[in-house]
Amino acid sequence: MTEKNILGRINSIKDQLPRAEKKIAEFILDKPEEIVNMTASKLGTASESSAATVIRLCKRVDISSFTQLKVLISREVTHTNPVGYSDITPDEPLEDIMDKLLGNAFQTMQDTVSVIQEQPLLEAVEAMKASSIIYLFGIGASSLVAENIAHKWSRIGKTCISFKDPHALLAAMSSTKKGQVFIGVSNSGETKEIIKIMELAKENGSQTIALTQFGKNSLTKKADISLQHVRAQEGAVRSAATSSLHAQFILVDILFYAYASKNYDKIIDQIRYSREQIEKYSS
Amino acid sequence: MTEKNILGRINSIKDQLPRAEKKIAEFILDKPEEIVNMTASKLGTASESSAATVIRLCKRVDISSFTQLKVLISREVTHTNPVGYSDITPDEPLEDIMDKLLGNAFQTMQDTVSVIQEQPLLEAVEAMKASSIIYLFGIGASSLVAENIAHKWSRIGKTCISFKDPHALLAAMSSTKKGQVFIGVSNSGETKEIIKIMELAKENGSQTIALTQFGKNSLTKKADISLQHVRAQEGAVRSAATSSLHAQFILVDILFYAYASKNYDKIIDQIRYSREQIEKYSS
DNA sequence: TAAAAATTGAAATATTATTTCATTTCATAC
DNA sequence: GTATGAAATGAAATAATATTTCAATTTTTA
């Protein structure tokens, strides 16, 4: 209890505090990020009070020392970690590029997670579990996502078929029994090829899952189940499928682990087995 | 950058540190949660060294004071503790799965960024710029990374050849002129196929780039340039190439934008052009 | 193998946190 | 109102901690 939510605790007793301590408390709540680089006496001065009172406030909220207060506040402040989206400019220092890309990736993934709906995800898990073969299709960068899915589920003993050639995939699907799962991946949800193939898959009696961006689009309209990630913001350079891939990949991760968590024991064994096989082959 | 990922930074320079500083670094990495309640001299004693050396280590990783170190580590510890690297358990609530996966992905990417060395990255950019064709090979999950590279550079007008069949790739390479770039992708850096093909590429006069995990391995020993990401921690379920893919993808992003930033105008035009072409085709 | 550079911890110093204490403010009882 | 004790306050004293200095030692370089 002494460990968590210092800012909340300060806030809740703020109004019961004596004048000088209250001023300090308000300063802390107002600019918590600054506290961590201040000394007790600086904070005392800045909040029109004194170092001694700063220490008293620490004791009042049951924190052993001012340094401890800084440490604990530091934790809470970082949790609110707004990064935001930004694009790359000419001749930018590598440091900046890395920071921006990290920021973009974080933001994209975080936004994607916040947009994920539990219901369709669980439906997708059930459908995939019930299907003996999973058919996959994606074009361009989305083909990487389709292959990622194929790799992951193959490892846990599910047969996956992912062709880059839509004709070949259709041929394979048409010869299979009804009710198998088809997953179509498209960032925009408007790619001609994939809409077409999803239509045909449905005619053929397959259960269709769309993996695409958030919102309504031609693909989600056709799909039985829609798994959606955040609409990746695209800048001038960024159009090379950077953010969208991160969004799609984290969505696949979540789908996979949701699937794995439901059949834990079986899957652990299968992963172990497939790893052994690969090691045996590679050595 | 001075603000982020202190633990990663400490870890990455750990092996270059003098004896006493290294002992302190190891203590910090081993028990980061404890540091925040220790004084400089306590840490000095606990790690069989001295307070003075603790201060020196702070300066070495470019942190202004020991208190600042505590504050920054405190952030990371909480960031790391509930999320950090963790595995999935049976029948876990979706919320928890998402939190863990987000945490894993963040941590992996952040660690990767902190481990990236500017020199080889810039060398790789130059080599790729100079090469008229880029040859790529990766097997298993790493094939996704190879294809990701192929997609991205194709978009900016660079010819990329990525076969999944090593024989086909060798055949293609052997008929090309000397000095072309070959990029081999392998998470472990020990995959038989890729080591072999890199050897042959080198014999054939190609410039070789390895994209693999941090540290020495068979692949880095053979490559002219090594681009390294963090060694992804693998749990029971996590072995399905989840963290490693995030690490590899952010590394490719950084390579790409470093490349793009160096030829900004030209590349902007090409991206615009290739996007127009795709749109024209798709509609 | 000698000279130079880097590393080290003990001790000296500087900074910062905390306590003490005299003074002031505030609430309560008359 | 005002006397009284309790609480609150900040300046100054003190204690704790961080940082620098320096002489000794190790490591690297030529």
Image: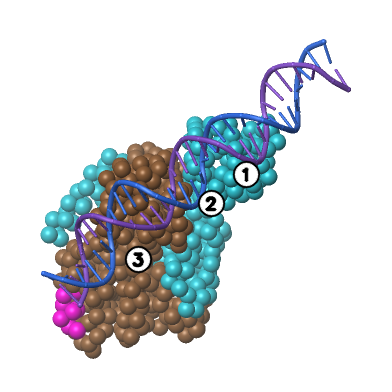
Chain colours: A cyan, B brown, C blue, D purple
Q: Is residue B64 visible?
A: yes
Q: Which mark is residue B116?
A: 3
Mark 2: few, some, or many residues within 10 Å (few <14, many ≥20)?
some
**Residue occupying image coordinates x 35% and y 55%:** B57
Q: Tell which subunit mark 1 falls on.
A: A
A87 to A155, vertically: above or below: below
Mark 1: few, some, or many residues within 10 Å (few <14, many ≥20)?
many
Q: Is residue B277 left or right of residue B45?
A: right
Q: Which mark is residue A37?
A: 2
Q: Tell which subunit mark 2 falls on.
A: A
Q: Please name the amino acid that badge 3 sits on.
A: Ile
Label 1 belongs to which residue?
A44
Q: Residue B121: x percent and y percent?
A: 34, 73
Most foreground residue, B113 or B70: B70
Q: CA distance from mark 1 to mark 2?
A: 13 Å
Is residue B94 part of the magenta span, yes or no? no
**Residue occupying image coordinates x 56% and y 58%:** A215
Q: CA distance from mark 3 to mark 2?
A: 29 Å
**Rendered image quadrant of residue A19:** top right
Tell me which segment is drawn in magenta: B197-205
Most foreground residue, A69 or A134: A69
Mark 3: few, some, or many residues within 10 Å (few <14, many ≥20)?
some
Q: Please name the amino acid that badge 2 sits on.
A: Asn
**Residue occupying image coordinates x 47% and y 78%:** A91
